[in-house]
Image (cartoon, rainbow, N blue to C red):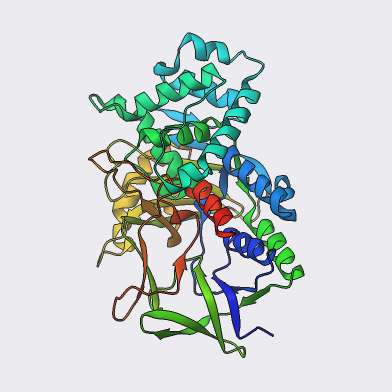
Amino acid sequence: MLKNRYEAVFWGRTPWGLLHALLWRSRGRDVLVIDDLKLSTASGGHRWLTQLEVQLLQELGSRHNVTPLASLDNFLRPATIKIQTPQFQWVTGASVRDNLREFVRKFSVFQTPTLMAALESETLDIDFLKVQKAFLDWFRSPLVRHRAASNFTFTGAPWLAEFQRLFSEELLRPYQKPQDGALAQLVAAHSTVTGQVVKYAFSSYEASYLALRLLSPQWELDERWFERELSRELINLGAHIKRTRVQSWQLWDGKVEAALLDSYEGVVAHDRLLMYGLPATDGTLQCVFNSKVYRGLESFWPEDPTQSLEEPKAELVCLTASRLMGTDIPMMLLEELPKGTRLQVLVEERPGAKPEFYVNEALELARPLVTEALDWPADRWEKFQRGVSWDLWVEEAVENSRGSAISLHAKRSINIIDRVDKRTLKGVQYWGPLMTERFGLLGYLTEVLWDLN
């Protein structure tokens, strides 16, 4: 039986909501996870992890005795991210050396004696791990948390310091010729794939973070098994997980007071309500991002069921072009799944213009890019199924043009409103990797760590 009141109710079952609930429960707090079937909890962009996120997750597991985090390697498999444009193809490798070599090979700006020599260095991985640890310590420090700080600079590894400097200069260089935007396209596409954000504006203070992520090997998180183990540990600690729907919310004076569950438990009140997903458009509570939002217009090509099924590749391809970036259809994602191939074309969500309106235009844009990326016969284009993905991407805010100091841990502007009268509601918070403005899962995990205090 559920209780009448909990210190925290986590609305939406996701790996990150379960982890947050588990950390709270380990502190002796009463928590309930509502696995609401009407809540969209798709977060595919956050299952692709770099070494930064992996290290922070493992540290959380060690510090707070969370078994699934301590054994995180069991839920990871090496992955490949491909960025394809008409001008270049960039592919992640299995090591820091592979990724540095890819930069040197594809961008002439990185073809310096120092970086060429680093490719032969025996301390490459050790240098990278030391700088990564120093970055994480700096990123989570009280100095950076409470006020804007100066940029993090690499120390102790001359090749990394040079890479960061060249990376930052090239990323922030004004466009003069079409090829000037190649690195910016790469960073925007990688952020879209691994963080569910569409980036066009970059700052010097995030150059170190971006450089480390792009040099790092990539892993895919097996979310299904990871969620299962987190749920098992939560239940063993006495927490409650309930698969049900929220029938209605009790509101009082602009505040969410309690949930009426679609089950015999009835009304459940809370001290804190944390939203880990997006409610259906006909629900009482609505989540509003004060930035452009994109949905995935989906095409799915099923495989021949008579063929033997093999383990799908942990590979994701992001397709874009300079003519697409900045438009309402900026990028597309191609992924091999167990039962077929999925193409998601990002389409800007606008009032009165449903993503389905863009079907023909989206496919016309996608066809030449997909044809270049894959060796498909022409008739395969006629064998797809259409749909709209639950996934959501958010465009990052443009930097303050006045150059004023910016907090690294600034929150994204997200309001939860009453669908009927459109007023902003108190007593509920949006949580998850999209909550932080520019540091995705890394910023979110840091916020969870601080939330325990």
**Which quadrant holds residue 64?**
bottom right
Is 381 rendered above or below residue 230? above
Rendered residue at 73%/73% (across/down)? 238
Camera-side residue: 122 or 328? 122
In the rendered view, tell whether residue 91 sits above or below residue 77: above
| Residue sitting farthest toward the top | 113
- Between residue 308 and residue 329, name the one nearer to us: 329
The reply to whether residue 341 is visible in this rendering is no
Residue 359 in the image: state x and y as whole percent: 33, 57
Vertical placement of residue 377 versus 382, above or below:
above
Q: Position of residue 348 (x, y in %)?
A: 31, 55
Q: Is residue 68 left or right of residue 243?
A: right
For residue 367, which quarter of the picture?
top left
The residue located at (35%, 37%) in the rendering is 202
Quadrant for the N terminus in the image: bottom right
Q: The C terminus lies in which quarter of the figure?
A: bottom right
**Residue at (52, 72) in percent of width and height:** 272
| Mark count | 0
**Does 188 sit left or right of 74 as displayed?**
left
Nearest the viewer among 367 and 307 is: 367
Residue 435 picture quarter: bottom left
